[in-house]
Image (cartoon, rainbow, N blue to C red):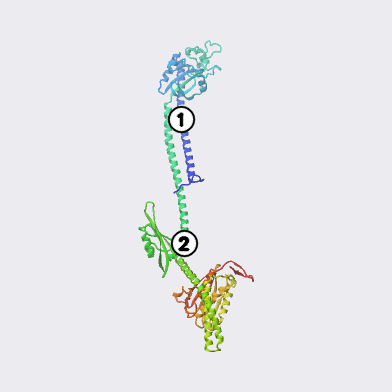
């Protein structure tokens, strides 16, 4: 099986590649979306946890302030206790410049936590934010941060007063601070009054931030697990998708291959059936699986399709070849004779065994060829060669004989004139003259037969030519009281032939028929048009017919069954017919008598002088 070239558009290979690319793209996109979604979920959970801790820390700070536990020490203690949880890396409260006010590690107080640039980039605000930071002391830490407002108000860098606890709670203020209704300083707010709680008189006029560092190990562990799970699911989806795509591809290839096999089988069947060579195929069980048209014709099978089913049903010569194929891979061509319907048919047989690459025999192929036409051509060729040799010999002998014959005839005429009329000497001289003329006629026919047949064809109406030939033998017909029947065929039937030479053919055939018949016989001539390509002429007589053994030899030179004659008439007739591209043969009629059948080719048609359609060559 051959795969389609990738250069072919819309081929199964391109479809498979495109489908695989789409599946890979979809799987990668789904994997990326899954990982991103899991990261977002994990990040949101950690952020919510950090936000809750920040709000709890602010609430704890407020609770401590209400209980009168003020001082900065209390804030540090609260930060350290809150940061003692295992998943909290640090807690830091800084001012707006990044300086640490309180830290889960007390020793860090007063140090710088973040640079001004980093703090500006993080941009803390009232809303809680999150960021994964790489800090030198802690490594990668998930940091949740916002502004620090333990008093419950929002600070805006001193741009507006913040609500104090007394105002927020509705009554009173922070323990240890003067109540708002007791001598409040003009324009003073509760946060300003309680600034001493943090030991910084300007605390409430500044912006402060809180940073909560959470352990990022769960984040990265979840991330790795999500990536691993996503890769496993994506790989499984990819394998399943590619497997489905490959199954579709192979299903398409199987469909295409089956269609191609059906087409190839149809073409092969037409080619094998149309071969002029007979083909017979047997399978491994010696059952006949194929007999093409030519083989059926050689074996004489009917068109119904019934034929040999197994090797044993075949003729003996074919079985011999097939048996030899059991031990040999190939049998060269050999000639043999098939007996069919009481007739012998010369054929050539050859065969070969069909085997797989592993050497397992899966069948046999027998080839047969009808040699009857080839044998006929070979016989005619041998005959032509023989006639050519005879012709050369006859030409030389005839010229040598004619000269003495002329001298003999001259002396015979001279002696006849010297003897009295009616005397025995004069009769002897007359006999000599007749014999010389007969011998000269034989020599003339011999020369005629030995020369190449030169013809000058022209469109000729066969009926007219036959009538003229019958007129030439009218005396012979009247003498034996022979009746003639002429069927001239279509009036417009014209054949391209030499009327003078072909008239000699008709004359020889008619004379042979008259000589073969008894008195009161019938000579019948019929002209037929065989389709558009052939004219058929039949010359029938009511004589005794031709012996079966002489049917194939009546046209041989010097063959004759009569007491007189040279035996060259029919040989010359066949030579003239073949020079016109036709054929002639003899048969015996079932009702008695012989029939000579001539076939002449019809060529291009034209118009006659009277306007009728005519055949012309």
Q: Earlier in the sequence, mark 1 or mark 2?
A: 1
Residue assigned mark 2 = 276
Secondary structure under tag 2 reads: loop
Decide which of 456, 387 is in the foreground and name it. 387
Instruction: Return the x and y of residue 36 as percentages of the image width and height.
Output: 47, 31
Q: Are marks 1 and 2 in contact (CB under 8 Å)?
A: no
Secondary structure under tag 1 reads: helix
Tell me: residue 308, above or below residue 17: below
Q: Is residue 499 left or right of residue 58?
A: right
Instruction: Return the x and y of residue 592 as percentages of the image width and height.
Output: 47, 78
Residue visible at 44% across and 37% down?
A: 234
For the question of whether residue 69 can be seen, the reply is no
Distance (Cα) linking label 1 and label 2: 79 Å
| Rendering quarter of residue 422 | bottom right
Task: Specify the label residue 582 is tagged with.
Answer: none
Closer to the observer: label 1 or label 2? Answer: 2
Residue assigned mark 1 = 39
Tell me: residue 127, above or below residue 347: above
Residue visible at 48% across and 22% down?
A: 145
Decide which of 592, 304 is in the foreground and name it. 592
């Amino acid at each position: 099986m051959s795969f389609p070239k990738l250069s072919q558009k819309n081929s199964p290979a391109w479809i498979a590649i495109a489908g695989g690319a789409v599946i890979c793209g979809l799987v990668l996109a789904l994997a990326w979306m899954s990982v991103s979604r899991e990261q977002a979920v994990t990040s949101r959970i950690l952020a919510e946890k950090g936000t809750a801790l920040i709000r709890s820390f602010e609430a704890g700070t407020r609770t401590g302030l209400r209980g009168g536990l003020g001082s900065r020490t209390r804030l540090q203690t609260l930060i350290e206790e809150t940061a003692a949880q295992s998943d909290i890396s640090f807690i830091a409260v800084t001012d707006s410049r990044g300086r640490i006010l309180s830290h889960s590690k007390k020793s860090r107080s007063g140090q710088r936590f973040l640079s001004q640039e980093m703090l500006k980039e993080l941009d803390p605000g009232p809303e809680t934010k999150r960021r994964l930071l790489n800090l030198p002391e802690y490594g990668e830490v998930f940091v949740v941060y916002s502004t620090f407002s333990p008093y419950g108000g929002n600070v805006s860098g001193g741009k507006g007063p913040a609500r104090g606890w007394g105002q927020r709670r509705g009554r009173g203020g922070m323990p240890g601070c003067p109540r708002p209704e007791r001598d409040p300083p003009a324009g003073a707010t509760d946060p300003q009054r309680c600034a001493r709680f943090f030991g910084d008189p300007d605390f409430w006029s500044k912006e402060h931030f809180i940073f909560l560092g959470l352990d990022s190990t769960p984040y990265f562990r979840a991330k790795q697990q999500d990536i691993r799970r996503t890769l496993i699911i994506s790989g499984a989806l990819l394998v399943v998708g590619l497997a489905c795509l490959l199954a579709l591809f192979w299903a398409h290839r199987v469909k295409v291959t089956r269609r191609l096999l059906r087409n190839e089988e149809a073409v092969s069947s037409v080619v094998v059936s149309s071969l002029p060579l007979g083909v017979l195929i047997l399978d491994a069980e010696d059952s006949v699986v194929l007999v093409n048209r030519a083989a059926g014709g050689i074996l004489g099978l009917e068109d119904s399709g019934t034929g040999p089913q197994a090797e044993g049903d075949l003729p003996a010569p074919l079985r011999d070849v097939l048996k030899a194929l059991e031990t040999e891979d190939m049998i060269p061509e050999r000639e043999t004779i098939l007996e069919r319907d009481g007739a012998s048919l010369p054929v050539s047989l050859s065969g070969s065994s069909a085997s797989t690459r592993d050497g397992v025999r899966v069948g046999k192929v027998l080839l047969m060829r009808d040699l009857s036409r080839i044998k006929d051509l070979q016989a005619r060729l041998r005959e032509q060669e023989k006639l050519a040799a005879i012709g050369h010999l006859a030409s030389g002998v005839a010229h040598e004989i004619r000269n003495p014959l002329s001298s003999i005839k001259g002396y015979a005429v001279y002696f006849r004139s010297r003897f009295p009329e009616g005397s025995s000497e004069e009769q002897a001289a007359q006999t000599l003259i007749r014999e010389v003329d007969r011998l000269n006629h034989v020599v003339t026919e011999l020369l005629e037969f030995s020369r190449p047949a030169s013809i000058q064809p022209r469109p000729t109406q066969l009926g007219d030519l036959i009538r003229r030939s019958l007129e030439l033998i009218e005396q012979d017909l009247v003498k034996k009281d022979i009746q003639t029947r002429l069927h001239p065929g279509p009036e417009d039937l014209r054949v391209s032939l030499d009327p003078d030479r072909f008239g000699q053919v008709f004359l020889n055939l008619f004379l042979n028929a008259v000589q073969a018949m008894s008195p009161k016989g019938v000579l019948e001539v019929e002209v037929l048009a065989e389709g558009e390509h052939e004219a058929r002429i039949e010359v029938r007589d009511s004589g005794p017919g031709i012996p079966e053994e002489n049917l194939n030899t009546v046209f041989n030179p010097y063959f004759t069954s009569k007491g007189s004659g040279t035996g060259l008439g029919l040989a010359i007739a066949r030579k003239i017919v073949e020079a016109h591209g036709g054929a002639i043969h003899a048969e015996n009629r079932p009702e008695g008598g012989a029939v000579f059948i001539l076939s002449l080719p019809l060529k291009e048609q034209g118009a006659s002088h009277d306007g009728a359609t005519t055949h012309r060559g």
